[in-house]
Image (cartoon, rainbow, N blue to C red):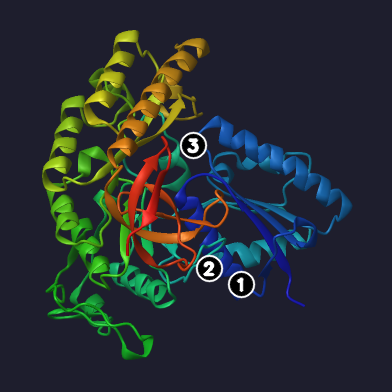
């Protein structure tokens, strides 16, 4: 009988995509997924190290896994991902709690590592790679709604922000072959998915350099005069765009974005995350050109103060960030904006905090991820800066930021009342009974009554009410 595995995923969308790669590798090795931990021969947790709270949650889950292992000593417990990379020795010494520690570039070795752990050996591979992108692996869509899917287009990061562990846990930046990205997007669309999100730590720095041979090896996807789809896939691609990439040796992110958007106008395309220093006008013009590229940009600002941004090593100023916001509003005027904000970074003063609040007012973000600064070991900030903002001050500043963002979100949602949006249906809403939910191109959640719709449908919804988090509407088509 096939052995069974159970996996939990914490952290960002990249971790979700990684778990789908893991599921594919284990499936090829004869393992089957289960949702009940008590039925699993292999228990895996895919971890995040971006904040201390994320790691603490994982330690709590490992306590649960340990109790399961005491009942069934043959069960193998493995820690994957960023926390595995950062805390390998500590995890292996954790009271025989963990049998296997696997970094984000070593998932191909999972079957061998599981076998080694099953023989009583500590199985470890946390070596980082400069080449691994898992480009040839077709991910298994875990917990999928059948409508939206993630595609990882690159791995690692070169930015070295002072507070961030990602370059240390995921290694240097490398981009995936665009041909494999297009192929995966086509396969997803052919299976009925209607939205994909292109993922990377900094998608705007995507850059793939190939050869004419690389292109000739992929004749069914890349032809002069546009994209073509093999007939057996049953998907007809648009030929209205001339991409002319046969002999191109370099593909940047705007070009990749256009390649994917041209697959079919019914396929929505999103991307995350953008770094302000690399968001070019070319990306914005590509968004404006294609209706099916979603009009939403997640552009982390982290702070509204140039002096704090300098200490963070973000490589842009407040003025540069606002210039990029103005470019978005000029080129893609209906684009929604979301961001990340850190309260209480090293040395932050009250005046620098007020600069963040004023920037939020000026931009008018639709949504934000907001956090207190959490010192991460081995980062530049931990090694060279003092975490000198008291917790009480961090909490007060974070509450200021949250309160302001709630006002901005409510204001933005209220401005949508009376407008009609094309909504991609994702499934049933939690409430009210019988309602459906979906998202606008601007990534706003819409709840509506429409019993005759199903996930994957596009419907026109007129907004009649709103909360700070959700639009409420009625169907118009």
Q: Could you tell which of marks 2 and 3 lies nearer the N-terminus?
A: 3
- In the image, taking residue 187 as reference, residue 355 lies left or right, namely left
Say the numbered circle drawn on residue 212: none
Helix or strand or loop: what does disc 1 sit on? helix
Q: Quadrant of residue 19?
A: bottom right
In the image, what residue occupies the spot 45% across and 28% down?
371
Answer above or below: position of 331 versus 41: above
Report x, y in % for residue 74.
83, 59
Quadrant where the N terminus lies? bottom right
Residue nearer the viewer, 436 or 308: 436
Q: How many residues crowd mark 3 within 10 Å: few (<14), some (14–19), many (20+)?
A: many
Quadrant where the C terminus lies? bottom left
Pointers 2 and 1 in contact (C-beta within 8 Å): yes
Report x, y in % for residue 381.
41, 24
Q: Which residue is mark 1?
A: 27
Q: Quadrant of residue 324?
A: top left
In the image, what residue occupies the spot 77% across and 44% down?
64
Answer above or below: position of 236 versus 318: below
Report x, y in % for residue 259.
23, 68
Q: Which residue is mark 2?
A: 140
Helix or strand or loop: what does disc 2 sit on? loop
Instruction: Say whether residue 155 is visible.
Output: no
Answer above or below: position of 153 versus 93: below
Q: Residue furthest bottom?
A: 232
Q: Which residue is mark 3?
A: 50
Q: Could you tell which of marks 3 and 1 lies nearer the N-terminus?
A: 1
Pointers 3 and 1 in contact (C-beta within 8 Å): no
Kindly report which numbered mark, 2 or 1, lies closer to the viewer in this rendering: 2
């Amino acid at each position: 009988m096939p052995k069974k595995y159970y996996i939990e995923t914490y952290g960002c969308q990249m971790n979700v995509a990684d778990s789908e790669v893991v599921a594919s590798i284990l499936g090829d090795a004869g393992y089957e997924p289960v949702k009940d931990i008590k039925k699993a021969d292999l228990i895996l947790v895919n971890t995040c190290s971006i904040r201390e709270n994320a790691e603490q949650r994982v330690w709590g889950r490992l306590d649960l896994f340990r109790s399961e292992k005491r009942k069934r000593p043959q069960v193998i417990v493995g820690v994957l991902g960023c926390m595995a990379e950062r805390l390998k020795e500590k995890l292996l010494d954790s009271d025989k709690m963990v049998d296997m520690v696997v970094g984000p570039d070593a998932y191909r070795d999972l079957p061998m590592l599981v076998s080694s752990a099953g023989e009583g050996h500590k199985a470890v591979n946390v070596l980082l790679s400069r080449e691994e992108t898992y480009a040839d692996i077709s991910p298994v869509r875990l917990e999928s709604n059948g409508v939206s899917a993630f595609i990882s287009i690159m791995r690692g990061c070169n930015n070295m922000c002072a507070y961030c562990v990602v370059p240390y846990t995921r290694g240097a930046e490398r981009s995936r072959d665009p041909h494999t990205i297009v192929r995966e997007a086509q396969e997803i669309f052919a299976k009925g998915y209607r939205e994909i999100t292109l993922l990377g730590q900094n998608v705007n720095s995507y850059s793939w350099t190939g050869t004419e041979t690389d292109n000739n090896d992929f004749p069914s996807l890349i032809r002069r005069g546009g994209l073509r789809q093999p007939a057996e896939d049953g998907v007809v691609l648009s030929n209205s765009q001339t991409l002319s990439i046969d002999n191109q040796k370099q593909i940047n992110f705007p070009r990749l974005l256009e390649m994917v958007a041209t697959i079919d106008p019914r396929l929505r395309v999103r991307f995350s995350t953008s770094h302000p220093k690399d968001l070019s006008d070319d990306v914005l013009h590509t968004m404006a050109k294609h209706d099916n590229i979603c009009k939403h940009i997640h552009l982390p600002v982290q702070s509204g103060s140039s002096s704090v941004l300098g200490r963070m090593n973000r490589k842009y100023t407040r003025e540069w960030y606002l210039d990029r916001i103005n470019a978005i509003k000029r080129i893609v005027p209906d684009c929604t904006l979301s961001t990340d904000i850190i309260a209480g970074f090293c040395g932050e003063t009250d005046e620098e905090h007020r600069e963040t609040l004023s920037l939020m007012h000026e931009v008018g973000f639709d949504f934000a991820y907001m956090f207190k600064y959490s010192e991460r070991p081995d980062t530049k900030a931990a090694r060279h800066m003092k975490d000198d903002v008291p917790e009480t001050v961090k909490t007060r500043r974070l509450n200021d930021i949250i309160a302001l963002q709630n006002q901005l979100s409510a204001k933005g949602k209220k401005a949508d009342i009376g407008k009609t949006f094309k909504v991609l249906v994702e499934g049933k809403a939690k409430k009210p009974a019988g309602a459906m939910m979906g998202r606008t191109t601007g990534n706003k959640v819409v709840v509506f009554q429409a019993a005759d719709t199903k996930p994957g449908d596009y419907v026109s919804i007129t907004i009649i009410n709103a909360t700070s988090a959700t639009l409420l509407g009625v169907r118009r088509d």
